[in-house]
Every structure is written in C-alpha cells, then in structure tokens.
Amino acid sequence: MIHLKQLSTQQLICLVILTQVGAHVLSIPYNESRNSGNDAWMSILLGGLIAQVVILIIYWLGKRYPSQSLPQYVTSILGIPLGVVLNLLFAVYCAESSLVVSVTYASVIVRWLLLTTPWYIILGLLIAIAAYIASSPLRSIATVTQSIMFMFLVCLAIVLISGSGKGDMRNILPIGTHGIGAVFKDALPALWLYAGYELLLYVFPFVRSYKQKSIIIAMSIANGLTTLTYLAITFVVTYKFSEGQMNYISEPMVFILRQFNWPVVQSLDILFMTIWLAVIAVTVYVYLFLSARYLASVLPSGIRKHTLLVWIIAGICYVIGLWGDHREKIIRFSVYHNFATGVMVILVPVLLLLISFMRGKGGVVR
Amino acid sequence: MESSQQLANNTTAIQEMLSNSSDFQTTDFTAGGRHYRLYYLDTMIELAAVQEHLISPLLLQDNVSVREAVSILNVSETQLLTDALTAIIEGKTVVQIEGDATLYLCATALNKERSINIPVNERVLRGSNEAFIEDLATNLNLMRKLLSSPGLVVKYYELGRISKTRVAMLYIRNLANSDILHEMDRRIKSIDIDYVEAPGFIQELVEEKLFSLFPQTLITERPDRVRSYLMDGKIAILSNGSPDCMIIPITFWSFFQSPDDYQINWLFGSTFRLLRIICFIIAISLPGAYVAMVNFDPRILPFEISMTLQSSMQFIAMPAVMEAISMLLILEVLREATIRLPSPIGQTIGVVGGIVIGTVVVQSNLVSNTMVVVVAFTGLASFIIPSYEMSSAARLLPYPFILMSSILGLFGLELAFLFVITHLSRLHTMGVPYFYTGLNGGTMRDTLFRSPIWRLKTRPKESMTNNKVRIRNPRGWEK
C-alpha cells in the first residue's frame, strides 16, 4: 500500500502561514500601537524580523537532527528525565494555545455574529471540528490546510477591498515621531502575533525536499507573507483611523469591514468573520495535533493512539473553555499565554540549540 | 468422477448432476460404424454450428478421430464427467463414441448479445459514440481495437462460487504502478461470495472507506474514457453481464472531467470544467446559504434585495428550513419518478412536476417564490456533474448543510464545509490520496482547468506511474 507521509514545501508554507495568522487579525494593531501610535507598522515589521531569527534558530536545531522531530531528539539533548518534562510542557503549551485561540474566536462570534447562541455550543462545535481534523494523518491535515488557503486569500482580498474606501493618507505621517524605544516596546506584543512557526520543530523530518535549504526558504516565505498580511492590515487601519481613534477601538478591522458597502454584499464583516473561522480552525487543529503528538512521545507505547489522544485533549480544552465566556478573563489570561509563548517558542529553542552545540555534533546517541 | 465407456451410464450420471434439468438433451447418430452421442443444453448451443461443423463432418468422414474431423477451433478432451459438466453449462457440446471413455468438448456456445449502442448515460457532443455492452468478450474487443498495444494486459478472475462470473482486470504494462496492481489483485482474490453483481459488488468489497457519500471508484460506459484512464496508468475492471467499467485508483477531480473537454478548444474545456466545479459547490451549499441568510443575517444582503426576499416570504407559514428541505425532497421524488415511470406515461411527470409543484405551491403560499428559484437552481447545478455517483452525492449533501445553517447560520455552513473537506482529505483509494487541492502548478493543469494538450506533458501523479512522460516533443514543428 502506498501512503504518502511527507509534506511538500508548498504545504509547509500553507501550514505555517495559517497557523501564524489567527484570531488577532481583528484587533491588529490595537495592542501594537499602545506606545508607538501610528508607527505601529514598524513594530509589526520588527516583530516579523525577530520571528525570522527564531525560525533560523529552529532550522539550525532541526538540521542537527534531520531525521528526527523534536519529541524524539529532545531526550538526546537533555537526557531522559528533562526531555520527558519538556515534551510534556510542549504538549501542555500547545493544548493551551489551541484553547486560547478557540476561546478568543468563539468570543468574537458571540459578540459580533451569533448574539443569542449559547457559548457552550459555539465553542463545542469549533473545538469538535478542529479535533476531527487534528485526528487525521499529517498529510490529510496539510491538504485541508491547502484548501483553507483559498479562503484565506478571499479574506485578504476582502480586507484590501474594504481598505480602499475613504480614509486619510496623512494618518501614517509623520513617520517615527514616537521614538525608537516605543517601537521596540511594541515589538514584543507584535512578536506574539507570529507564534506558529514552532511547528517546524515537529514537522522538520516530514518535509520532502531535495535540499534542506528549501525548508528554510519555505519558512522564510511563509513568515514573510504573514508579515506582509499584518502590515497590510496595519496600513488599512492607520489609513482609516487616526491615532486618537485607534486608542478607543480594540477591534478596528470589524468597523472597517462593516462600513464598507457593495451593491451585492452589504456587511462584509459577517462574510469575513465567517470565512475567517476556517483560518482560526487551522491554528486550533495544528496545535491540537502537535499537543497529541508531544503527549504520545511521553506516554508508553500502548496508549499512543493519536485519534484518542486528540479527542481527550480537545475534551479537556472544551471543559476549561466553558469558563472563558468573559472577555476580561480572556484578556487577563492572554498575559500568561504570551509569557508561555515567549518561553516555549523563543527561549526553549535557543537553549536547546546552545546545549546541543555544547554536546557536539549530533548530540549523545543513546 | 470418471467417464464410463457406456453411453447410457454417462447420460444418467450427467442428468443426475444437472438435477434432471429439462433443457439437457442428447442426440445419437451412427457414422462409419461408430455410434456417437452428443450431450448438450439445447438452450446454450448454436444449432447451426453443431450441425455444420460437428455432425456433418463426422457423418462424411470415416476412420478419423473426432479431433481431426470437426471444424471447430476449441476442442479439448477429458476423461472426467465433472469437466464435461462445466463445459455443458458453458454451452459446449460434448461428443462421445460408444465404447470409448474419452469425452470431446467442442465450443459451440450460443452468444446472444445486443449490438453496440451509443452511450446513454454519458453523452458527449464531440468524440466517439461507442458504449460497452453486457458481453465481456465484445467489451474487450472494443478495448483492444482502441489500444492496439502488446502492453495492454487482460487478467481474468472468476468471481462468485455459484455464478462463476468472469471479471477482467485491464492495465497497461509499464504504466500501471505495480504496488497498486498487487493490492487490487489481492483484494479481488479475497472476494468469496456466492454471486457478484458487478461492478457494484466489487466496488463495495474493495473500497477502503465504508461510510462515505463520495464515490471511490469511477464507473463509466465509454471505451474511450477507459482508454484515457488506462493511459494514465490506472486499472480498469470489466465484468461479464454489465456494461459498466470500474476505474481505480481515482481522485475527486476525475469526476468533473468529461471526454468532451479534450475534444474542444482548451479554453472552452477549461471554462466548462470550472463551471462544473463551481456548480458542485453551489449544489451542496446554496440552499444552506439561503437558509442562513434568511434566518440569521439578512443584513449581509443590500437593503433592496432583502426587501424583495421579505415581500416574497410575507405570507409563507413554514420556516425557511422546512421549505428548503421539502422542496429538495420533492425534486428528488420527481427525479426518481422519472427514472422508474414507464415511458408512455412519462409526460405526466412534466405536468405534475412543472405545474403542480412549480406554480400551485407558490400560489397557495406554501413555499416562497425565491425558495423555488433556489431549489431549481440547486437541482440543475447537481445535474451538471458528469458522473451519476458524484451527482448523487451532491444531491444528498445539501440536507446536512441546511440543518447546520438553520441552527448556526453562516457559521454552521462553514463548519459543514470544513467537515466535508476534511472527510475528502482523509479518503484513500488503493492507498492513493483521493483529494488534493488544485493549488500546485503541477496538479492544477488537469483539475480545476483543462490545460492545453501541449502543457499536459506528464501523467497525473495520483496513478503513481513510473513512466511519467506523456508527450515528448509537443509542437515540435514550431522550431
């Protein structure tokens, strides 16, 4: 029997872009303009550049163990007890990420689309469809993601079209008045927007490519396209709203979409938020999938059934998510989430690479 | 069971084995001092052949063996009555000489077959107008005529313990992937069943996913279509008694291809291909989208359009979901009735369907005008898909879509879409992925569009063929 298990570089690009892009899109550049104001685009760009550096680090790490994924080689870097702990931490972090994203978007749906539908139904269905997708093999997941890429492009077109209406170019000027410090300060929240590239830690050995270099090229293209998307949204928002207005509107994209009128479609925001659901689902199911895979590497081989693990994790996420129906709670919780992202996505790969360098090429073979 | 030298013994033995079947006959004649007896089923032999090529040569020639005397291509000898019995059932005439236990099996089977017709279910405007018939030999003959290559391999299987249906697997050596061939061979050989209703039974016994609306094998009645798939490196299964040919492995996009696409200008071909795919999406989602917009988000539509909708729905008592489901159901009943109805009273359907359903239902305020438009368009869109199986899938899928969007609006519709895409991505035929997106430059050429022939240089990747190149020097005259 022939079963394709490997990803093409194109599928990798789709997976990474759509995992990076998530529920934040509606609120860009609210968090990123707290200090930098109309220079938020610089912070976004800077965040993208930092993300690119982290991608390079993850790539170097993967290159040292080209035939293994992180849950396998982490024990040869850190030894068995620490490696197991780190795998568990990654499993928890991924589950938590998928929970945060699904809860955030469910709250968007409850606030803007389905005002009277109960919270538990919306969240339940969102997590259920994500779990169904995540329980598939990696190749099927990649195919689904490629199909969702179409929807992402439609959304992007909607954003660009709605941004072309009335606005003021001068909102972007004067450039750089907030100072370089403010830009750097806001690059930190911008950095959280790019989380998702740590996917490479797991999928590195599954990418089918003639040269390893094409993996880093694909990753850079993906990260670059995400940066461009975020920049486009930032420009659209700054074009439409002045700095003073931006301070009061935490989800500017919704307002821009809502006031745009077409002879065929009146309120683009409904259309956008509905289609965007698929893009959110990618982030949710990729993290669910990763969480199950990290967990499976820790568990004894008897209970490693992927489908079962995915559904168990999804169930736990759902039960915790039932308490998340207040927006304040989500905002408060996102502080911890951002901290966890910083540690797991940026700090851990850097440390792993350093330790693996110290251990010598290829690490300790057990 | 050994044959006896006594004619009477053999006759009773065969009669017993055939349970005294009334169509079993024997004929005796003497020539050159020898006493011949023929055993046969009178319903299965061709009388003229027996008279001309068996009896008359034996009557005219003395002192030669049966084998030398008769002018029949396929003559074999046996000593076993069981062999003779199978031969008699197949329509052979068995000859025996008194005092000799040898049985001569002469092929004199009567073949009642209809002539080759034009395809009824897969019509095209341009291209060949031959269709398979029920006779396997004729079908293989058609295929051999279309593909006169020594590489065309025909492999027979006998399926069905009782029916002994002959099934043929066709492929082209060096093009078909050997792993897929082995797998198909293994699966067909594992079938142990009393009789096969081919290719429906075979299809259900070899496909991977048991619960799926989507067809996992392609059924066609057109030899030219089978040829094009064989040339892509796929496997075709033909069986005696059925004019349908089964193609495996297959992908989602193949169901939107029609032989027409390759006969006309590639620009038209691409347009119509794209039209079919869009119609598939419309067929499964339009009623759902309508229900979602009417129930949840009328503000997605411009004011004027929602006013029109509102005025048409003003006096309708039923909720939009009920309207949509009942109208689709009526359409489905109409479709089924048209197939089953005897043709002389077929026109009644037009009257009942067109006037009663279309006009009166609206006039009596049971269903809104716009809903009739939506359902009619949905129905038309589902009929545009060239494959009957895929078009049936497209007519069953709207129901869950409608239910989802009636509960959750456009959000539910999107969830249903994601579910279908995931289901498609999880399907495999013979281990080959069933669905892939046509995003990639290599795969887009013959999926969403029909690229010009000179761009289709390689065979599609899903057949996993080793010999990838299809055209070597396209438009070489230009240089």
Image (cartoon, rainbow, N blue to C red):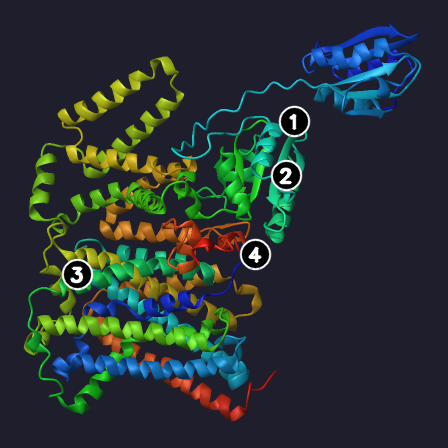
Question: Tags 4 and 3 in contact by the CB under 8 Å rule?
Answer: no
Q: Is residue B373 above or below residue B431?
A: above
Say which residue label 1 marks: B163
Give the residue type that dot 3 points to: Arg
Asked if badges 3 and 1 are on one and the same chain, I answer no
Q: Is residue B96 left or right of residue B288?
A: right
x 18%, y 91%: residue:
A181
Residue A358, given in percent of the width and then of the height, sits at 51, 93
Residue type pointed to by label 2: Ile
Q: CA distance from mark 1 to mark 4?
A: 33 Å
Q: Which residue is mark 4?
A: A2
Horizontal side of B170 relative to A110 (left or right) equals right
* Label 3 packing within 10 angstroms: few (<14), some (14-19), many (20+): few
Give the number of the disc on residue A111: 3
Q: Are marks 1 and 4 on the same chain?
A: no
Query: Which dot, 3 or 1, sits closer to the camera?
Result: 1
Which of the 4 image quadrants contains residue B330?
top left
Amino acid at circle 1: Ser
- Is the C-beta separation of discs 2 and 3 under 8 Å? no
